[in-house]
Amino acid sequence: MGGTAFAPDPAFEAGSIALGELPLCHVRLQIDARWPWLILIPRGVGLREIEDLSAADRARLIEESVLAGQAVRAIGAALGRPVEKLNLGALGNVTAQLHVHLVGRWAGDSAWPGPVWGVGTAETYGAEALETAVGAARKALNL
């Protein structure tokens, strides 16, 4: 990262688009149309682990994760793929900047029941589906 101001790691630019800002986190939509998928990136410089957050910010991260989970469900519903299970993960093995993935899953999706990482090739959203996903997410997140 470096510098003194928060910025999402450039690695996020290729696979996701910015949706807006919650009190703690920058929110991005993963642009893989196979799953409704949001990324929360706490705004802070040099954050790598959840333990790097203050106790208050850890609590806020959980609350924002719940809200983002509702948004993932809203994306799934808007696209006609109801979410049966939310996967939440803070891996950081590829991109070290602290971030949390919320992925909507259902029995029979292309990676079920395994994790989504490393499965197949990302599928881009069509223009209408992307507009629908962005609108549903922003509405659920009050952005």
Image (cartoon, rainbow, N blue to C red):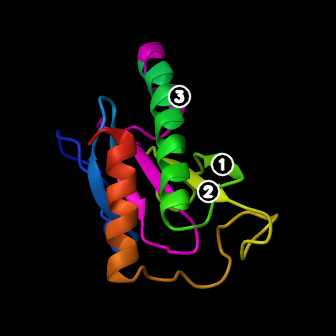
Q: Nearer the viewer, mark 3 or mark 1?
A: 1
Q: Is residue 30 above or below residue 126?
A: above
Under mark 3, the amino acid is Ile
Is residue 49 shown in magenta?
yes
Characterize the local packing of mark 1: few (<14), some (14-19) or many (20 or more) Cα atoms within 10 angstroms: some
Under mark 2, the amino acid is Gly
Q: Is residue 11 visible?
A: no
How many numbered circles does the render carry?
3
Q: Is residue 101 above or below residue 47?
A: below
Tell me where residue 45 appears, x and y as whole percent.
29, 38
Residue at 34% x, 78% y is 128
Q: Residue 86: which numbered mark, if any?
A: 1
Q: Which residue is mark 3?
A: 62
Residue closest to the eye, 83 or 14 = 83
Q: What is the spatial separation of the Cα atoms under label 2 and label 3, in whole angstroms?
A: 17 Å
Residue at 28% x, 57% y is 18
Left or right for 101, reference 24: right
Residue closest to the eye, 114 or 66 = 66
Q: Is residue 80 above or below residue 104?
A: below
Q: Residue 109: which numbered mark, if any?
A: none
Q: Give the magenta part as a residue range.
A: 28-56
Q: What is the spatial separation of the Cα atoms under label 1 and label 2, in whole angstroms?
A: 5 Å
Quadrant of the image occupied by residue 83:
bottom right
Going by the picture, which residue comes out furthest to the left?
4
Q: Which residue is mark 2?
A: 104
Is residue 1 shown in magenta?
no
Question: If you read the primary sequence from the N terminus, does the residue marked by circle 2 or circle 3 appear first?
Answer: 3
Question: If you read the primary sequence from the N terminus, does the residue marked by circle 3 or circle 1 appear first?
Answer: 3
